Image: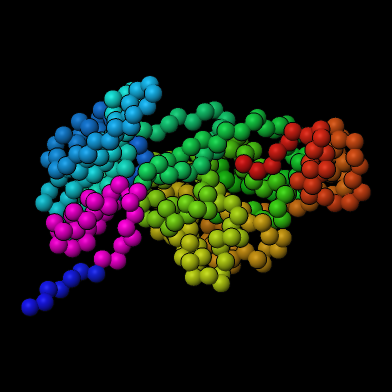
Amino acid sequence: MQTKKNNLKININKDDSGLNDFLYLWDLFKNRPNKVLIHGTFDFKETENFFEQYEKVNKFTEIICLETDDIINDKVLLKSTEYIYISYIAVDKLTEDAVISDITIYYNSSEDADEVNEIIKSLSEYQVIDELEDGHNLNVVSLSGNSIELDQIKYDDIDNDNIEEYYSKETFKSISKWIKKSKKESGLSIFYGQRGTGKSSMIKFLSTKLNKNLIFIPNNLVDLTINSSDFTKFLRKHENPILVLDDCEMIFNEFFTKSNIIVNNLMQLVDGLLSNKLNISIIAIFNVEDKNEIDHNLIDCNNLIDIIEFTDLSNTEANQLSELLGYKQKQKSDIRLLDLINNNKSNSKRKLGF
């Protein structure tokens, strides 16, 4: 008599710290487990105390030997009920910097969902959220193990008093109106124009003008953020966030199915059922010269705050900026901000972008 074998359609990744737990529970449940990854880091002592109520199934200790002190990490699997298990990593557990990360909840079926949500709700009290420095509300999403975290983007002080000199009159006028709208509204904003017109640099200026958390999402983390249902749980920890996506012409293309999926997921955040609950804004930056090259689904967004074009500096505007920066070369035609600065590299410390 032949036995029926399950067809395991999964990627075997030796660096996936949760793979052994996943396979162990698959065998225990006799079907594929559901799992919820809780992003962020958690207070070590308080979270460890919370976990004491659960049965410890397994613990694996990793010791990293260094010249000074050793680093000791624990990988732990806990049992909540017959069909709910929790795994986590205690990072650098013997130091004051110890945290809990990579918390994953495995469960058997939708019948366990209510209890899983209660565990998540309880754990949220112990999450560590770093205080933002005054005037520096710009952060980038990073991946730590299996967890999404935020790292502050450090940058030099911005010449806010003269910032409008770096942009065309119409562009900066539109930005000034956008700032007033964004303080009151949430939704989608589109910045477009050819490369080198100062779109990314504008984000640094906006981070000093808005009392909101600007979160830059690199293109290689879109699948773990915009395309992940778990990302909304992470965003709830950050009040009125503004997500920033650069080089959107590379990820939003109406000819590709995957791009359509990303657009749909993005629209759910600012235009769907989730928009009222999450209160999220998104800035999508496109390096294109024609608005018609932008996905029409984004332009048709119900909660569209504005579409702002970043244009070249006129020769008059370019010469005014050159005088302000101490450049000697005179401009006879319109020019990109980047070209103006590159043409004066010898006496310029100005940088564009993040």
When the figure is inspected, residue 323 is found, relative to residue 274, above or below; the finding is above
Looking at the image, how many numbered discs can be counted on the residues? 0
Which stretch appears magenta? 8-36
Q: Is residue 11 magenta?
A: yes
In the visual, does 157 lie left or right of 338? left
Query: Could you say where residue 112 lies in the image, as x and y percent from the top left?
Result: 18, 55
When the figure is inspected, residue 26 is found, relative to residue 92, above or below; the finding is below
Whether residue 89 is visible, yes or no, is yes
In this view of the protein, which residue sits in the foreground, 12 or 43?
A: 12
When the figure is inspected, residue 179 is found, relative to residue 6, above or below; the finding is above
Q: Quadrant of the N terminus?
A: bottom left
At a point 31% along the width and 62% down the height, the residue shown is 10
User: In which quarter of the view is residue 109 placed?
Assistant: bottom left
Query: Could you say where residue 346 lies in the image, as x and y percent from the top left?
Result: 82, 35
In this view of the protein, which residue sits in the foreground, 311 or 23?
A: 23
Q: Quadrant of the C terminus?
A: top right
Query: Could you say where residue 68 lies in the image, as x and y percent from the top left?
Result: 38, 21
Q: Is residue 106 magenta?
A: no
